[in-house]
Amino acid sequence: MEKFYSKIKNSPLFCGITDEELTRMIKCFGGYIKKYEDGDMIIRQGEIISKIYLILDGEVNIEKETYWGRRIIIQKLYTNDNIGLALVASKNIEANINALCVGHALVLVLNYDKCSTMCQNACSHHSILISNLFKILSKENIELIEKIENISQKTIRDKLLTYLSNESQKNKTNVFEIQFNRQELADYLNIDRSAMSFELSKLKSEGLINYKKNKFVLKVEL
Amino acid sequence: MEKFYSKIKNSPLFCGITDEELTRMIKCFGGYIKKYEDGDMIIRQGEIISKIYLILDGEVNIEKETYWGRRIIIQKLYTNDNIGLALVASKNIEANINALCVGHALVLVLNYDKCSTMCQNACSHHSILISNLFKILSKENIELIEKIENISQKTIRDKLLTYLSNESQKNKTNVFEIQFNRQELADYLNIDRSAMSFELSKLKSEGLINYKKNKFVLKVEL
DNA sequence: ACATTTCTGTTGTAATTACAACAAAAGGAA
DNA sequence: TTCCTTTTGTTGTAATTACAACAGAAATGT
């Protein structure tokens, strides 16, 4: 556990918390590290979540399956991201998503219940943590709205251009790498993969974009 | 202002805060009440937001306009909801949405900056407030994911059935009223209004649903 | 190197949708 | 009531998409 402290300390979750406090907090939270393998479900739709999950290493997809069996990718999470954070605040709400491990992953698991009941006002660090939770959720909120923008476009072409434009802005350059492979991108934008590939080719042949594998160049500004 | 205290006190934002504390807080936050009329922009895309907006009365649409001029309705807010809460946490982020008043509205405006800088550790109520902010954002987060589920369905029919099913679950009955008129619902689900009307008629004729104006009966379970 | 698997691109067709134009219904104001 | 406006429903057509089936490229293992 101790060898991860430097990593944990640098996460947004524990931002502003000193080393000594961190040690106390992890004990107080009953924190432990869990290893996940490819395809493992970290959170399953319908579960009640009372733990905070912090990704120390690896990649996690937040997904949903439609009634008709299609996969929806809500978002992709990486190191320093929290999994299903919004679910811990409301104690009686069932998870509305699945969290799936992609490849290997290391996750710090904290018992939020323990904290929120035990140290209500006792621990000085508790208020820092809640403040961090607020900031993290804010960021996630803004990202979800961006995703809504991406998938709300009318045509495949518009979805791609909006998505690429948003990625370009986030990377602050028109040359960037995207996080999804083609199938994942299609499941993120809710479109057919082959139709998407076709449209990508068309955009390339028209000179609006260029790409090779996951490296993209956006040659137009929206 | 005083006459709104009972209303303000019952909002999730000030949940768990006593009357005396409330008075102090509103003063400390530089709180005031603002009136908006139909079509007024409460938050405009691109603005830096440092205020907390609490709807005391009325209806507010969170919208976005696409590059190609279509309207996207992200969500609809009512009394006790906060407008653009996620935007205040990150001080340098531009608003990614518009907040439009629908009809008349009364909004309590609080200066979050003032609070977060002045009473960092001084006010006991500050930590309660942050904790409330976390809970509110969590709920909003879950609602955004639900919206993503709704609009991620493949066909108009699936979008409608998923949306109505989710509404039915939230209302805990299969007879319920929806918040949108037809055009708004179409802009929420990102589909053409007339095509949606057509599909609604079809669903009704097939006996899967019934409706009259905004009153719906869902006769199937997804 | 080879074989095998996974990922990506291409094409044709049937299904679905957007759009426009219009009709019908509902609601408000005089 | 009548007129006018807004909202909702209907229909035909052109555009877009999903889907299936396949081909080619890239990655992986032996």
Image (tube, coloured by chain):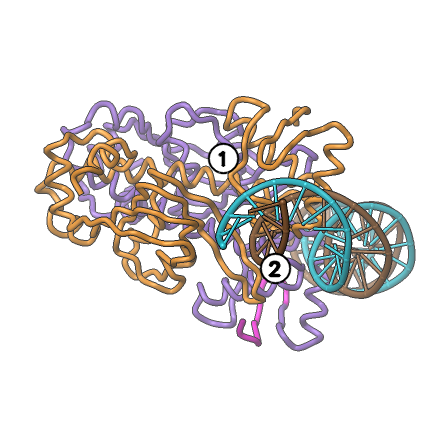
Chain colours: A orange, B purple, C brown, D cyan
Q: Secondary structure at mark 2?
A: helix
Q: Are marks 2 and 1 in contact (CB under 8 Å)?
A: no
Q: Which mark is residue B36?
A: 1
Q: Bounds of the magenta span?
A: B212-222
Alpha-carbon neighbours of circle 1 within 10 Å: few (<14), some, or many (≥20)? some
- Residue B97 placement, left or right of A213: left
- Residue B128 placement, left or right of B96: left
- Residue A92 placement, left or right of A24: right
Q: Disc 2 designates what residue?
A: B159
- Within the magenta stretch, is there residue A210? no
Where, quadrant-wise, is the N terminus of chain B in this rendering?
A: top left
Residue flagged by tag 2: what amino acid is it?
Answer: Lys
Q: Secondary structure at mark 1?
A: strand
Residue flagged by tag 1: what amino acid is it?
Answer: Tyr
Q: Residue at x 50, y 63 (%)?
A: B166
Can I make out residue B103 in this image? no
Query: Is the residue at mark 2 from the same chain as the one at mark 1?
Result: yes
